[in-house]
Image (cartoon, rainbow, N blue to C red):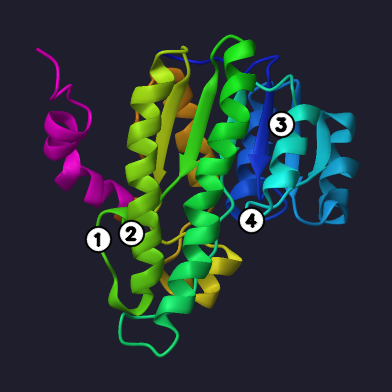
Amino acid sequence: MTYNIRDRVALVTGANRGIGKAILVGLLKEGAAKVYAAVRDISSVAALNEAYGDKVVPLEFDLTKPVLIKKAAELASDVSLVVNNAGVLKAATPLSADAIESLQYEMETNVYGLIRVSQAFAPVLKANGGGVLVQLNSVASFKSFSPFSTYCASKAAAYSVTQALKELLKEQGTMVISVHPGPIDTDMGDSAGLKEIAEPPELVADAIVDALKSGEFHVYTDTMAKQVGAAYQSFAENVIEAELLEG
């Protein structure tokens, strides 16, 4: 299954900065007719509106607020590509005093948010011919980094949910893509102390565009991600992407 973004309508969560902004711009460069910028503060999209006019449509959105997500699905009823990029990170280990609170915070956005988006937009994608759901996961979905243990746990859970969505949404003709960046030059990456090894967010946007054209499920975007992906490839092909329960 492949997807051509030209003349199509997309929605990107967290599109006002970092990876989300790079994805929005990348989709427009590929010929998208319109991209909904789903953000908490619609005023944060003003510069994108100035640059791209009515091809960028600000949409109030919050992964922790089901009412806003449902409203967004109603307003963006013409989308055939949904990119769930927004996420949160707290630096906490299992031994941190705030470990439980940090994990609850990250699960609320990174996992429950994905489920809410999927439930709200799956019918929209189906009505518009199937389309694509792209989920921004992480290399942290595969490996835990102790300073960010709770974040890694939430991303592992999101990756598990993404695998289930791949199987479930295939029945309605919806392609699902799981994106696994390593350290990327964003505000989140800076706060995690990764700036020195971080790579440009445009690499993520380019990798997503390539995956839409190729139909790949797992997407590795940068130097670290590609190293991890190469090591993970056999397991991914023979276990994650295999139909183990058939026959």
Viewer-closest of 230 and 146: 146
- Magenta stretch holds residue 233: yes
The x and y percentages for residue 58 are 83, 42
Whether pointer 2 and pointer 3 mark residues with C-beta atoms closer than 8 Å, the reply is no
Kindly identify the residue that appears in the image at 83 percent across and 35 percent down. Answer: 57
Majority secondary structure of magenta residues: helix
Gap in angstroms between the C-alphas marked 1 and 3 = 33 Å
Whether pointer 1 and pointer 2 mark residues with C-beta atoms closer than 8 Å, the reply is yes
Q: Is residue 141 visible?
A: yes
Dot 4 or dot 2: first in sequence order is 4
For residue 161, above or below residue 14: above
Q: Which mark is residue 73?
A: 3
Instruction: State which region is magenta.
Output: 225-247
- Magenta stretch holds residue 151: no
Which quarter of the picture shows residue 214?
top left
What kind of element bears circle 2? Answer: helix
Q: Tell me the residue that label 4 is attached to.
A: 64
Residue lying farthest to the top in this orientation: 129
Q: Which mark is residue 143?
A: 1
